[in-house]
Image (tube, grey):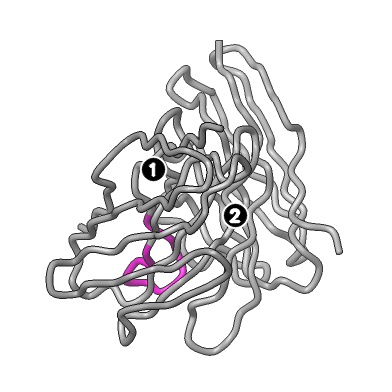
């Protein structure tokens, strides 16, 4: 079946602009995660959804970042007033929610965001 | 806080040789570890995982070893192939149980 998809694959924007990044998880996966990966680094956790609700948004760097998942499937990561330091690859992952909490996360290809 | 790190940033091996990638972790409460492979332009891909009640787990051509005493784990790849060239990350679950903490990564280059 289809994996996690993310659009756009690349996004170039100017400092101060607003951007939206979209994630389509694997069908049936109730858990969805956003990570941010800077060049040469491992992914860093941003936010975790269980169904429609954000169960943990402790990784969001500041209030310019916001994410939604209104119907429990597709999620959108929104960044306001972008800064050059926001440039990174934004990765989305999804998983089933099984007992024990240690469920394999399947990652999408990411959206490469460049803020000029 | 927890940190998960790798000993070597790059590793170059010849095709057919075995590869060993090492990782150290700091949080002794970590109970689940995963190795991911990331090829250029792609998201991380699950390779193998291990729980803290085990010290070894084998998959197809890969073996993960966990040493809880020194908080160290390794990924062994047997008969390394050119398609194994990628960046490898170890990760562990945070105390929350779902968010992953990734190390910096080791770049594996397989030469013919």
Where is residue B22 shown, x and y percent of the image? Answer: 29, 53
Q: Dot 2 surroundings within 10 Å: few (below 14), some, or many (20 or more)?
A: some
Is B78 or B38 nearer to us in this picture? B78
Position of residue A104 relative to residue B11, above or below, is below
Please state if A91 lies on the left or on the right of B109 as rendered.
right
- Which residue carries the number 2 mark? B45
Q: Main secondary structure of the magenta part?
A: loop
Identify the residue at horizontal 62%, vertical 29% (top origin).
A112
Crowd rating for badge 1 (residues with CA inside 10 Å; few <14, some 14–19, many 20+): many
Q: Quadrant of the N terminus of chain A?
A: bottom right
Secondary structure of residue under mark 1: loop
Quadrant (top left/top right/bottom left/bottom right) for the C terminus of chain A? top right
Residue A100 placed where, x, y %?
A: 48, 87
The answer to which image quadrant residue B82 occupies is top right
Q: Nearer the viewer, residue B18 or B91?
A: B18
Residue furthest to the left in view is: B69
Instruction: Check if residue B104 falls in the magenta segment.
Output: no
- The subunit carrying tag 1 is B
Find the magenta span and give its range. Answer: B92-101
């Amino acid at each position: 079946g289809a994996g996690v998809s993310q659009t756009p694959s690349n996004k170039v924007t100017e400092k101060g602009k607003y951007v939206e990044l979209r994630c389509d998880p694997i069908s049936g996966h109730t858990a969805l995660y956003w990570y941010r990966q800077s060049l040469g680094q491992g992914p860093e956790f941003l936010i975790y959804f269980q169904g429609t609700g954000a169960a943990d948004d402790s990784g969001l760097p500041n209030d310019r970042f916001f994410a939604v998942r209104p119907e429990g499937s597709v999620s959108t990561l929104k960044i306001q007033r972008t800064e050059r330091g926001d440039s990174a690859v934004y990765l989305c992952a999804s998983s089933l929610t099984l007992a024990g909490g240690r469920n394999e996360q399947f990652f999408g290809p990411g959206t490469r965001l460049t803020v000029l | 806080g927890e940190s998960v790190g790798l000993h070597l940033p790059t590793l170059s091996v010849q095709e057919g040789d075995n590869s060993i990638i090492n990782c150290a972790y700091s949080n002794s409460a970590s109970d689940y570890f995963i190795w991911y492979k990331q090829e250029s332009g792609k998201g991380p891909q699950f390779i193998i995982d291990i729980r803290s009640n085990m010290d070894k787990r084998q998959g197809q051509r890969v073996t993960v070893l966990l040493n809880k005493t020194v908080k160290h784990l390794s990924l062994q790849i047997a008969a390394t192939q050119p398609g194994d060239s990628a960046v490898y990350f170890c990760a562990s679950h945070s105390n929350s149980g779902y968010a992953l903490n990734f190390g910096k990564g080791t770049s594996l280059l397989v030469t013919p």
